[in-house]
Amino acid sequence: MNDILDSEVLNSVNRCQIAEMEKIGERFDPNQQASCAQFADQVRNVQAVIIHTWQMTAYASLRESEPATAAKLWKEMSQLCDHALIALKRLKEKHSYCGTPELYNLTLDYKNAADKRHYQNLEDAECAQTPPPRGLFPQMS
């Protein structure tokens, strides 16, 4: 199984978990305890998606020799967070006692950190392609 397929499969599974949270969130009444409990289970699933994908992204990016490729991994993580934040923004008001505000804040923190790593890796990629100025190092004889 190649890296592209792994990334595509992971992204597909992650987006399904977010879509399932949205579907359950729209269907259940937040005032009923059983509904909130069932919805909170799905909120935890999305939290697990965010945390696990972060760990996998960190692992893969540290082993990546090309900073531009590592930047792409962090951009994908940021996009996953964006997708979750869009869903959570709508749901956190309706289901404020079922864990959505906390997950929204956590996901926002992960998104900001992913963006930071994305831009750091883009800068590293640019630096790697910039030759050092002439005369910076002594001539070797």
Image (spheres, helix red, strand yellow):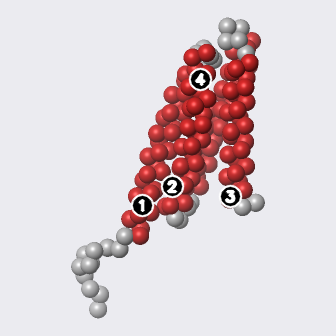
Residue 2 x/y as whole percent: 72, 61
Mark 4 or mark 1, which is nearer the start of the sequence? 4
The secondary element bearing badge 1 is classed as: helix
Q: Residue at x 74, y 18 (%)?
A: 27
Q: Is residue 58 visible?
A: no
| Residue sitting at the far bottom | 141
Task: Read off the residue under disc 4.
Answer: 90
Observer-side mark, 2 or 4, equals 4
Q: Tell me whether circle 2 and circle 1 mark residues in contact (CB < 8 Å).
A: yes
Residue type at tag 2:
Ala
Q: From the viewer's perspective, is residue 140 above or below residue 108?
A: below
Q: Residue at x 69, y 21 (%)?
A: 25
Q: Which mark is residue 4?
A: 3
Q: From the viewer's perspective, is residue 105 above or below residue 65?
A: above
Q: Residue at x 58, y 48 (%)?
A: 76
Quadrant showing the N terminus: bottom right
Q: Which mark is residue 14?
A: none
Q: CA distance from mark 3 to mark 1?
A: 23 Å
Mark 4 or mark 2, which is nearer the start of the sequence? 2
